[in-house]
Amino acid sequence: MLAGKRKSNTSTETNYRVGDERLVKLTDAAAEKVGTLLSRQGRPDGVLRVAVMGGGCSGLQYKMDLQDAPANRDILVESAGIRVVVDPKSALYVTGSELDYQSGLEESGFKVNNPNAATTCSCGESFSA
């Protein structure tokens, strides 16, 4: 992975690494939805943060958030024109994952296809590794 630095408005540097789509990949549908959300929030250069936290029925759950820029120690991946950041701890759980967005009458939302998930709950929003 490559190292990157970004200067913020307070003259402090943010250190992050640059990864590739082997960490996390977005489908075209997910990239389009994230791009729309970033534009609505007035963050055209923003990032999608993908994290794994304890909780949910199966023990771990995904958390996604839109932010202005990578934070210290993040891994930055560009996929389908969208910048995605993952913290090092979450990277252990999401490596190889694909983020999709589905829009339908019964189910709409982001879906994570994670090859590291040993089990998932019936709602599909939590997993165990």
Image (cartoon, helix red, strand yellow):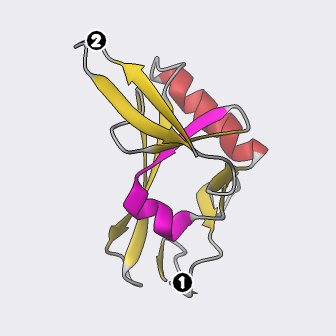
Instruction: Answer left or right for 48 relative to 77.
Output: left
Relative to 67, say whether 88 is above or below: below
Question: What secondary structure is marked by label 1?
Answer: loop
Relative to 125, say whether 58 is above or below: below
The picture places residue 2, in percent across and down from the top left corner, at 57, 39
Task: State the residue position of label 1.
Answer: 122
Dot 1 amino acid type: Ser
Q: Which residue lies furthest to the bottom in this view?
A: 119
Dot 2 amino acid type: Asn
**Can residue 102 be seen by looking at this rendering?**
no
Judge by depth and name the residue closer to the eye, 87 or 2.
Answer: 2
Residue at (59, 77) in percent of width and height? 116
**Can residue 80 be seen by looking at this rendering?**
yes
Q: Does the magenta stretch include residue 88?
A: yes
Judge by depth and name the residue closer to the eye, 31 or 21.
Answer: 21
Instruction: Answer left or right for 13 relative to 122.
Output: left
Assess whether mark 2 and mark 1 are in contact (beta carbons under 8 angstroms).
no
The picture places residue 79, in percent across and down from the top left corner, at 69, 41
Q: Is residue 67 magenta?
A: no
Q: Which residue lies furthest to the front in this view?
A: 2
Magenta extent? 82-94
Disc 2 residue crowd, few under 14, some 14–19, many 20+, Cα 10 Å: few
Judge by depth and name the residue closer to the eye, 96 or 5.
Answer: 5
Task: State the residue position of label 2.
Answer: 9
Instruction: Answer left or right for 13 relative to 77.
Output: left
Residue at (49, 31) in percent of width and height? 4
Residue 65, by quadrant, is: top left
The numbered disc on residue 29 is none
State how far apart marks 1 and 2 are (Cα): 44 Å
The picture places residue 49, in percent across and down from the top left corner, at 45, 45
